[in-house]
Structure formats: structure tokens, C-alpha cells
Image (tube, grey):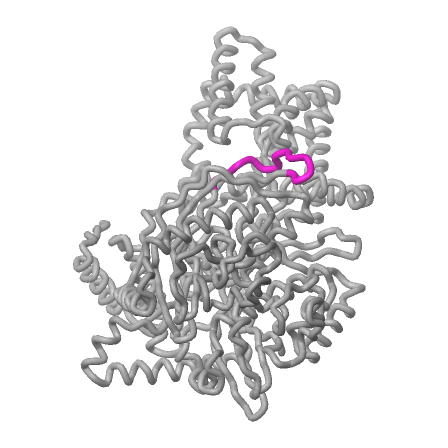
Amino acid sequence: MEETFKIGRRGFTVIVVSLMVAAIILRIKWPDIDIVSSFVEQIFFDKLMMRVIMYALPVLFAFIVFLMPLSMFFLYWCSAVFAGYYVLSAPLEGTLFFALMAIPTLFNRFKIVRFPAAPITLGISAVVLITVVIISAINDVFIIRHIVAKIFLLLPTLHILSMQPGDDSQSRFQSESGQVTTGLSSTQKARMQSITRTNWWELLRPHVESTAINIYKFYERNSEFAINTSKSRATPHLHTQAQDHARNINLANLKKRDGDFDQKAFIVRITKAFSVIQDAIYNQHIEKIQAFVSDALYEQFKSRIDEQQAAGTRYQYEKLEEEPFSIDHAYCDGSFDEIQLLVKASLKESLLDSKTGKTIEAARRRVFYEYWSFIRRPSGKTLKKPGLLEGSCPNCGAPIQIGQATVCSVCNSFIRSGFYDWVLARITQGCEWSYTDPTLVPNWKQLKADDPEFTIHQIEDLAGVIFWNLRLVEISRKVEPIFRFASSECATYIADALRTSESTDRHWWENIALASVSLKGIVIDSERVKLYTLVVWSGIPITANADGAITQRIRYNKPVRDVMVLSRDKKCRTNQNNTLSSAHCKSCGGALSSSFATQCGYCNSTLNDGSEWQLEKILKEDSAEFVEILNQKSEIVSERFAQNMAVEAAKVAEKTKIEETRSGRDIITVMAQVLLADGVIDAAETKFISEMAVKYHMPPEQLEGIIESVKAGEVKFLKPTTAKEAMDTLKGAVSMAYADGVLAPEEEAALERVAKELGYSALDVKRIVKAEEKLMRQTKIKPQRQF
């Protein structure tokens, strides 16, 4: 919605011209400002006019309901026209009076002083205004009445001047938002000086672009017709019987292999590491945690810190509040044990100028709901001494030095290989969590037979590292960061694209968030093996001209779904020591001198010699090549389901076996596509999908990005093609909608519409709801009825 009310350079020029023309026309029509003031004065004091207003209120209310927020924009425009008319009609009086009123509001805008929240400020202003009106009416003071009338007409303009541009920046695992803010660091101000000297728009843009959005948000916050997701019902945490069953079995098997493993002790250890990670990120010293996080996760942190340092900013946090961590999922694929902890916490953070230490943005509360995935080899044992998380080599116990993330300098063991200790492989947002049985991936079994050390964890790490290096290529406009990962053809293609764009506008992304990486298909031919990896991410695309001036920036986080095609020679095999070290030298494990290095500085080996997976190309999700891969997977899913249902005993196993669980993002994207199929989504459906997003712990800006992209036809997410996949999607939507035991009529109507598009009926929705009611009774959760 914010994108709809964006004001660009041309729009601002049109508005200013319209204000000037309207003010001049008023000046010609009514040269005396007192005529207008007297008219407004009559509204306040004439009994007949008061009656007219009272009778007109219902009509005015209906007008606002049907035309808001456009009517609110018109109200602000009229007030600005009066301000111009006032200055033209009485230059000295108008300038002094307007300046007297505007200076305090500008102090609030630039945070020299801070007004209370808008409802409180407007309430106080209304009380003062009414009090003055009553006093002037009793004493019949002409001057006061005129002043009141002018303040009343100028009030919307003063409100605009007091608005502070919003700040949607994400500091922990996302980069800063493209949301413009007047709070710039000294570094950013110095960088902008050369631009603003020759480009007036760059000076005004941060204020102008945010004005329309703030007006609309003001309407949203104070209108009972706006969708308010903050008032949604309590967010439940869901678990299926299959998930609980799989977790308990896998933890029991882990305990058999490692008799010293204790869940409580493990959680205590991770809780301590959590604080260490928070401090490292906020203090911009992430090298302290590099030894126990995957390279993909480290590159994500590094990208975040690099942006902060380039902007001359840093974040500071306080009042960290965390709920007790819990083990939500546990898996074992034969190559790794994986434990996923649910992390629910909140903190207050503020944005500071790293040079001056001054506060740029005041402290605000951040809430996160995440899954932290730790992996270890099945042969690993619980340490009875300090390990990776405590800063020691898990093999020999020697202290780990800064920059020593892969190989111990004392015993030469690969410390992040997973053979010795748990390693933090990834952090997944609650709405992005999903699971797929690897055996559902086409040709998985054949590749594992040829290469037993091949693991999904290595591909996730490699794809994550490649992703962040591709973003570095866009920002730096240099191809070197991708040389060590791409095939020669792919690197040449990227280099040619950069060379072609030298004389054109620059394009890059801000507020980048890597949501998930998942292996979808494998193709094995006579010479090479190809992996089709779906990378889901989001960001704000930025376009700038040759002078560095931003010419285009959308106002929402745009979701992107890319397919990385990785390939290698069929004879190559996986190096088990480098599973989570994709950004290090594959030969010696040494750290690279920079992201632009193509040769190891320790062993002098070439980083990309063709013996590892290479980026071959990037496809879109709706490409024919990738659709064929998904069709193969769908056939496997259907065959597996038919086999399981063929025997009665397998029906019981089906209830306790996890094969595939869709993410909240996928389910909400499907629902958005269905509900927006006709291009229209009504208020009830908007409320329903907003509440679903809250239950999946999806941030509002992320939901907005999905909806806006679906409206624009930019999301090519493919809906389920088989009955089994469609039913799983429908079950996921119904289960989450009914998670708190409440299913309102409008929610049921929206679900029935989704069911129809997926090939099911309203009766199927009711059956799933009854199954959920039965499950709640079994788990002693009392459902609530809403009438």
C-alpha cells in the first residue's frame, strides 16, 4: 500500500505548482485574508452553522470512509494552500505567524525536541483550541477568534511539518531498509554534500518521500476501518504429531549414540552462545564467532556489518528478554545430526553514529521468533571440556585465534567439520521454516550412492555464500567476488553484463534478507551433475544514475525466488571437511585475503579449479527447465503417498512420518495468489491473511511485499500440481487459521475460496476443522467458538 502513495520528484513538482496556483487564485479572488478568517470564525460561533455541521457530519463521515485516504490527502493539500494564501495576502503577518507555529513542529521533525505520540498531541491541541474558543466566545475577543481560525486552518500543515520519517531498518540479520530517514550519520551527510550542491531533489527527497506514507500510516493507526494486526488473537506455537514423534525418536537415537548428551545441558550451552552472538553482532566484532557458525551465516552477518560501517552507523541494544529455549525439531540424515532450537526473544535497539556516538534513531522494541539449526556428525560425542562455542578447539582444547575458523593451528583438525562439536549452520525466521524429506528430491538416492559424503547442508552453505557474493558484485560492480564460484561461461556472462551497464543506471538491493535455500532437484547425465537450488529472498531494489543520485526506489520489500543451477564433473566427490566452509580454501582451509581473492594466500592453490560445485546459471521459478524438475518431484510425492496408503499399516505410519512441510511464506503466497486472482481483495480477506501472517510470525512489511508483488504479477510461485501437495497446503492454511480454536465466518469463507482454487470444497475445509478440534481435545487444548 505504501508504494501507491509514494511521491517522487515529478509528483512533488506537480503538488508544489498546484499549491502555488491555488494560493494565487485565492489571493486574486479574496485579497483580504480576514474574509476567510471570518468565515471560519462563523463556523465556530454561529449557532446556525453549528447545526449545519452537525447535520452534515454523517455525510462527511461516509465521504471519509469511501474516499479515505485520498480525502485526507485533500485535507492536507487545502491546508497547505491556505498557508500559501495567508503569506501572499499578508506577507509580514503571515510569515511571522506561520514561522511561530512551524518552528516547534520542525524541532520535533528533526528530533531537537520530542512531542508525545500523535493521538496525545492532537488531543492536547484540540483541548487547548476548544478552551480558547470558549474563552473568546464568553469575552467576545475579536483577535483571539481570528487567531483560532487561522490555527485551525493551518493545523494539518503543521502536522505534516512535525512528522518524522519512519525507520524500518533491521539490524540483526537484515540490512538497513530503504526507508528514507532524516537521521543520517556524519559519514552519510558528508557523502551527500557533493550531491546536494548540484541536485536540490536529493536534499528534499528524504522528507518529501516519507510525507505521503506517514499521512497514510496516520490514517491507518487512527481509523477503525484499517486492518490492525497488532490486535490479532494470541499467536500459538504449532506442532504436528508427526513433528513431535520424529523429534522424540531422533533425540532418543542421538542419546543412544552419545550417552553423555543431555537436552537441558545442550540448551544451557546454546543460551550462553546466544548472548555471545548478540554482543558480537552489535559490537561489529563478528570475527569472534566465526569459528562456530557456517560460512553462509558468517557472510550474512558480514554483509550486514559492512553496510553499517560504510554508512558510519552501528546499533546498540538493551533490555534483552528471552523466553526459555526449546528443542523443536531433530533430524538425522545419516551424514549429520541436526537440532533446531526455537528462539523467542525481544530487545530494544537504537541506531548510533559510529564516529560521534550520537543517537540517530531512538530505541525501539524488536521481536524475533527464529529457529537456530546446529549440526554435528553422528559419530560426534558430547564434550567434557570447552569446545567451539566456548572458543576452544574441540579436538585438542587449544584456544581458537581470531581468523582461525577452519583449521586448528595446533592439531591441524578441521574444527567446523562437525566431527568434534556442534556448529550453528543457519538461522531461520519462523515464517520461513520448512522441511522436505531429501529422498523426495529427484535422483537423490543415485547421487548419494555415487557420493556418500554429499549433504544438503553443504549445498545450503555454498548457495548462501554465492548469494551474498552476487549481492557484492551488484554493489561493487566488480565480477571478482563470483570468480571462485562460477563456471567460466557464467563469470563471462556476468562480466559482460557489468561492462554493458557502465554507461547506464546502477541497480542494487537494500534491506536484503535471505529467507531460505532448498534443494529441489538433481540431474545426472553422462559427464556432469546439476543441482537445482531454490533461493528465496527479499529486498528493496534501488536504481541510481551515473552521478549516484537515486532515481527509483520502491517502498516495500520485494520477494524474489531465484533458482541457482550448480554443476560439477560427475567424477568429483565431496570433501567432508569443507561442509560449512564454502568461503575458505578447499585445500588447506585457510581464510581468504578478501572477497575478491581468486587464489589462496596460504597454499597458493587456485580457488576455482573445477573440482567443486560451480554456479552455472540462475533461472526464474517459472522457467520450463525448473518446472520440469518440480513435475518430477510431484510424481515422486504422488507415488510415495499411493504406496503408503496401499496397506493399512502404512496409514498409521503416515501420521507419524514427516515428508514435507511447507513454510508459512509459501502458504501465504498461495493464499495471496488465490485471493487476488480477480485482482481484488476485500477488507475481510485482507484481515484474514494479515492474521495468518501474524500466526506465522511474518513481519507486516514482508506480508505487504508479497501482496504488492502478487498484484504486480511479479511473483511466479507455482501452486501445487498434485492432490497430495494441494491437500498439504490446504491443511497447513486451515490448521494455522484454527490454531487458537477460533474460526470466524469471514475466515471460513476465505479458506473455502482457497480450497476451491486448489480443487477442494467447503466440505473439505469443515472436515479439516473437525480433525483439528479432535486433535485439540486429545492435547487438552479447549477450542473456542466465535459467533
Q: Does the rendering let one see residue 707?
A: no
Residue 326 locus on image (x, y percent): 34, 54
Residue 298 locus on image (x, y percent): 57, 59
From this view, report whether residue 758 is shown above or below residue 244.
below
From this view, report whether residue 32 is shown above or below residue 285.
above
Residue 633 locus on image (x, y percent): 42, 81
Count of labels shown?
0
Q: Is residue 607 left or right of residue 170?
A: right
Is residue 356 a member of the stretch shown in magenta?
yes
From this view, report whether residue 579 is shown above or below residue 611.
above
What segment carries the magenta color?
353-365
Residue 478 location, quadrant: bottom right
Query: Of 471 and 398, which appears nearest the observer?
Result: 398
From this view, report whether residue 754 is shown above or below residue 136.
below
Residue 105 locus on image (x, y percent): 61, 27
Q: Residue at x 59, y 86 (%)?
A: 569
Q: Is residue 427 left or right of residue 107?
A: left
Is residue 259 a member of the stretch shown in magenta?
no
Q: Residue at x 56, y 15 (%)?
A: 145
Q: Residue furthest top?
A: 139
Magenta span dominant secondary structure: strand
Q: Residue at x 49, y 30 (%)?
A: 117
Q: Is residue 529 left or right of residue 82?
A: left
Q: Residue at x 19, y 52 (%)?
A: 782
Q: Is residue 448 left or right of residue 529?
A: left
